[in-house]
């Protein structure tokens, strides 16, 4: 059998195995396992030896496992304590098996950086993964851009973000908008106007996943602007009715808002027990950057 034929056969087998596994999980759910670390080989060197000439095939399998783990935790019921402990080890194994697996580096970094409970909130591991990708492909400007993205969005380190955007702009083939983006980030870091400049540029990317992620961030920024205005109305009501719980119905009755306000997804904003206005857990905009859910609500 030729290499191409073997690869095609492996792909078919992988697809069948994944479909079979999904059907099996749906009909016969796996029992809870107290030691999830025992499910997977943890050493990249070990798995490469075991994979023999099927590194790319094995990388696909571990990538699917990473997606299953992330998706399972992210969409778990509200009373489930989310634990993304296997996410980085699975991504590390994936990229050890296939050092040029660009999607695993870039999507993996997004998943790792997502704030808890939507993700593990591990910006440090997101950058570790991207730096690993750079070690394999030093001229990959996309990884440099993504590191700048992590510094900007998750760590609010605008100087470092600008440095990485600048480095990315100097790579042959990088888009022309990276250079002015670095300047804007450095000059206006910390302001929403700078965030809009960043994500406005990324929203024009030719890569669908990056474009969609940037558009989501822009919607979150819009929601934050609306929340600022609503928070002022809540504060006014609290001054006029000290010690009284605040609800949208009361604000509507007091003519401070015309109706119950909703975000761009059509989901009503909520007023937490502390009086803070934010997006609901049911909203695709949840959680907003830099905000932690109020467990007392």
Image: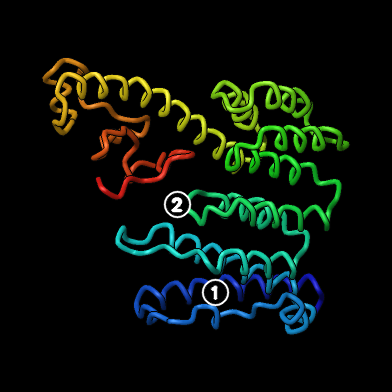
User: Nearer the observer, disc 1 or disc 2?
Assistant: 2
The quadrant in which the C terminus is found is top left
Quarter-of-image position of residue 6: bottom right
Q: Name the mark on residue 16.
A: 1
Closer-to-camera residue (36/295): 295
Closer-to-camera residue (60/8): 60
Q: Name the mark on residue 32.
A: none
Vertical arrangement, residue 131 with respect to residue 17, above or below: above
Along the horizontal axis of the image, is 157 left or right of 16? Answer: right
Residue shown at 78% from the left, 26% from the top: 179
Give the x, y percent position of residue 86: 55, 69
The quadrant in which the N terminus is found is bottom right
Give the x, y percent position of residue 88: 61, 64
Element type at marker 1?
A: helix
Quarter-of-image position of residue 249: top left
Residue under numbered circle 2: 118
């Amino acid at each position: 059998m030729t290499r191409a034929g073997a690869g095609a056969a492996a792909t078919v087998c992988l697809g069948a195995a994944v479909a079979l596994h999904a059907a099996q999980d749906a009909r016969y759910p796996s029992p809870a396992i107290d030691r999830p670390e025992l499910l997977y080989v943890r050493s990249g060197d070990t798995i490469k030896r075991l994979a023999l000439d099927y590194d790319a095939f094995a990388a696909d399998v571990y990538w699917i496992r990473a997606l299953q783990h992330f998706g399972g935790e992210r969409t778990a019921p509200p009373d489930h304590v989310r634990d993304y402990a296997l996410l980085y080890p699975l991504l590390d194994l994936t990229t050890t098996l296939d050092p040029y697996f660009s999607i695993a580096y870039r999507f993996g970094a997004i998943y790792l950086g997502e704030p808890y409970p939507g993700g593990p909130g591990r910006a440090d591991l997101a950058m570790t993964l991207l730096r690993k990708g750079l070690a394999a492909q030093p001229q990959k400007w996309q990884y440099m851009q993504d590191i700048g993205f992590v510094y900007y969005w998750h760590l609010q380190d605008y100087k470092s973000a600008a440095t990485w955007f600048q480095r990315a702009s100097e790579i042959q083939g990088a888009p022309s908008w990276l250079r002015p983006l670095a300047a804007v980030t450095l000059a206006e870091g910390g302001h929403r106007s700078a965030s809009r400049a960043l994500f406005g540029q990324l929203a024009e990317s030719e890569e669908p996943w990056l474009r969609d992620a940037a558009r989501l961030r822009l919607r979150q920024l819009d929601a934050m602007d609306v929340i600022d205005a609503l928070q002022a109305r809540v504060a006014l009501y609290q001054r006029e009715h000290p010690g009284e719980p605040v609800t949208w119905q009361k604000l509507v009755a007091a003519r401070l808002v015309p109706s119950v306000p909703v975000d761009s997804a059509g989901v009503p904003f909520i007023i937490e027990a502390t009086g803070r206005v934010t997006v609901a857990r049911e909203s695709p905009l949840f959680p907003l950057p830099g905000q932690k859910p109020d467990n007392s609500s």
